[in-house]
Image: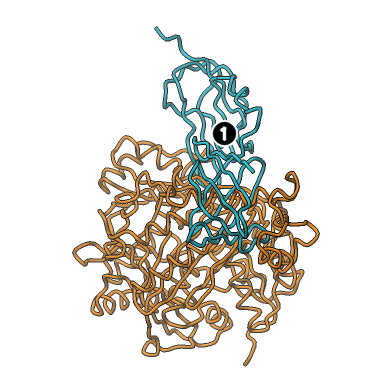
Chain colours: A orange, B cyan
Amino acid sequence: MKNYFKKILVANRGEIAVRVLRACREQGIATVAVCSEADHQAMHAQMADEVVEIGPAPPLESYLRSDRILMAARATGAEAIHPGYGFLAENAEFAAACQDAGLVFIGPSATVIARMGEKTAARDIMEQAGVPVVPGALLPEPDAEGDLDAGQVAKAAAEVGFPLMVKAAFGGGGKGMRLVQAGEDVVAAAAAAAREARKAFGNGTVYLERYLERPRHVEFQIFGDSQGQAVHLNERECSIQRRHQKIIEESPSPILTPELRREMGAAAVAAAEAVGYVGAGTVEFLLAQDGSFYFLEMNTRLQVEHPVTELTTGLDLVRAQIAVAAGAPLPWQQDEITARGHAIECRLYAEDPTCDFRPSLGKILLLREPAGPGIRVDSGIRQGDEVSMHYDPMIAKLSVHAGDRGAAIDRARAALRDYAVLGITTNATYLLDILDHSAFRAGDTHTSFLPDHFVNWQSADSAGVTAALVAVGVHELVRPGTDGAMLTGLRSDPADHGSPWAALGRFRLRGLG
Amino acid sequence: MRLEFKHDEDLHVLEVKQDGDGYRVSVDGDQQDLEVLALNRGELDLRLGSRRYRAYVASRGDERYVFIDGRVFTFRVPVAEDTDSDAGQVNPLVASKMPGTVVKLLVEVGQRVETGDGLLIMESMKMESEIAAPLDGTVVGIHVTAGQTVGLEVPLVDLEPAETS
């Protein structure tokens, strides 16, 4: 086996940095992590061979500082930079700066990022390639104060029609997005979206787009190489979204027929070929109830939800990204790409679904991850880590693979029932209830699924409260620092806290005393 | 042993007694057999009546968190002097509901506001949200400036309630 690079710098944090670092290690490639002042103890920073601090906790001062990241690459002698997703992953200037510095950016060229990253330019390219697009309009850039011309916004909105979405022209992942039902709200929504976009992506340009009622979000994984080949790796359906961010993704889509898959896949490949795409990318479509589909946007990076494609196709996308970035041809032809079974990914967020998905910050006091056949956990956190306000509240992804969709749902639910996170609030119970909803099980999914079925959701926890009370009671009685061994023989001596056998042995002797 | 825990607004009473080889536990007066099969580092293996439970428990301050079968329960250990005395200050003060950064102030001192009017825009975890006036009144104090990073429950704006006629 040949190594494409000797050393790769991973310009990200959290689970995706960990995912890329693992791919490098497997291949014997040395790794460099970058971290903010707040992240020295973070999982990604500790698992790399080298780590370089690049600034204070706020991303604008660290993970978005391309100058410092390039300096770190030079200082450590890295040959290539993997940007992960988010942060600088779809920043054309960063990709160009890498090239200028003699480094390989693991992703498409700066030109392609720029053309696809400008969502309206991408729409034009799609229109020319014969792919239908949703009506939309680009807004003029906000002024230095971050304010938009209200008259121009209102005029553009009237042309697009309501309801409409305000979207960041250079963004993704739900940041800088607003749904506007009527005319009077559009100016304020556009201004807020522009500010969010500027902070998250470094550019405050936003555009308006007509909003389709209850479509499915179906996207195609594409892959291209520098020899001009392009393939697709089937679809992912990502219709389960809260606040326009995906939380459950699956492959295959429960609705796609082989004919529609061929048609949409061909459109996705045509899109990749139209721009000479190199590397991993995603072409997102909205699939209307009548089976018509519309180009939404192209993401020029590895997606959060890539594991469901990896599980069904059995292919390693990050490994292929590295090979293709080094100039190697695609490791697979289109007719070699097959899919088996069904995969589902659940995004575990540190947030409270009963409280408007407010992020939940703090220390993770206890963490137990599920394991078993067909269960994959991509996590960037460990017990004892802090969930900080500065970063995305997605802390891990649980992905499962099983023979069919029903079995995959069962497996995902069983795994979530084994996924213990204490100290912060997560959406795990919310995910459990979504997976078990009759409409979800029936495959009746669309982007309004959560607003339709899960408004004012509450965890139905009254059933387990007695057992939970007994558990907390027992724990209280043996806790170090309480009034001694209140339960005879059950006292956990801090000195032998580390040995499970010490405790186990004693409990087996029930009624010691 | 008798223990009390608060769950939401309800107070629950737990009594644990040794009983031969195991224990008898009473939860709000309802008695069951309890067997503690294993206990280590916040991980508990219990048999309650005929059912077996694996539970995880963690604590912070007076809060206790329990994970059982995919659900998390939060309990509070009641303190003798309940901190209700603090609740005496029913100040019409608007405080941050979560840590974040002040993006923009929407009001000035002296400005009259109505319930629901935006006072300022906060940003946390890259999402913006507007902090709205909880009542009709006048802004009498602003404790933060744009760009400032604030923690949880930090005073942001003081409101003087409007006279109710």
Secondary structure, mark 1, is loop
Q: Is residue A28 visible?
A: yes
Q: Amino acid at mark 1?
A: Ser
Work out whether B147 lies above or below A421: above
Q: Which residue is mark 1?
A: B96
x, y percent for residue A164: 30, 48
The subunit carrying tag 1 is B
Work out whether A153 lies above or below A448: above
Decide if residue A108 is on the left or right side of residue A135: right
x, y percent for residue A259: 23, 79
Which residue reaches farthest bottom? Answer: A1
x, y percent for residue A365: 64, 54
User: Number of marks in the image?
Assistant: 1
Work out whether A464 lies above or below A218: above
Residue drawn at 26 percent across, 80 percent down: A258
Residue drawn at 61 percent across, 39 percent down: B77
The 10 Å Cα crowd at callout 1, few under 14, some 14 to 19, many 20 or more, is some
Q: Nearer the viewer, residue B57 or B116?
A: B57
Q: Quadrant of the N terminus of chain A?
A: bottom right
Which residue reaches farthest left? Answer: A290
Q: Is residue A59 visible?
A: no
Q: Quadrant of residue B150?
A: top right
Q: Nearer the viewer, residue A30 or B77?
A: B77
Which residue reaches farthest front? Answer: B20
Q: Nearer the viewer, residue B122 or B92?
A: B92
Q: Quadrant of the C terminus of chain A?
A: bottom right
x, y percent for residue A300: 47, 68
Work out whether A149 lies above or below A73: above
Q: Nearer the viewer, residue B46 or B22?
A: B22
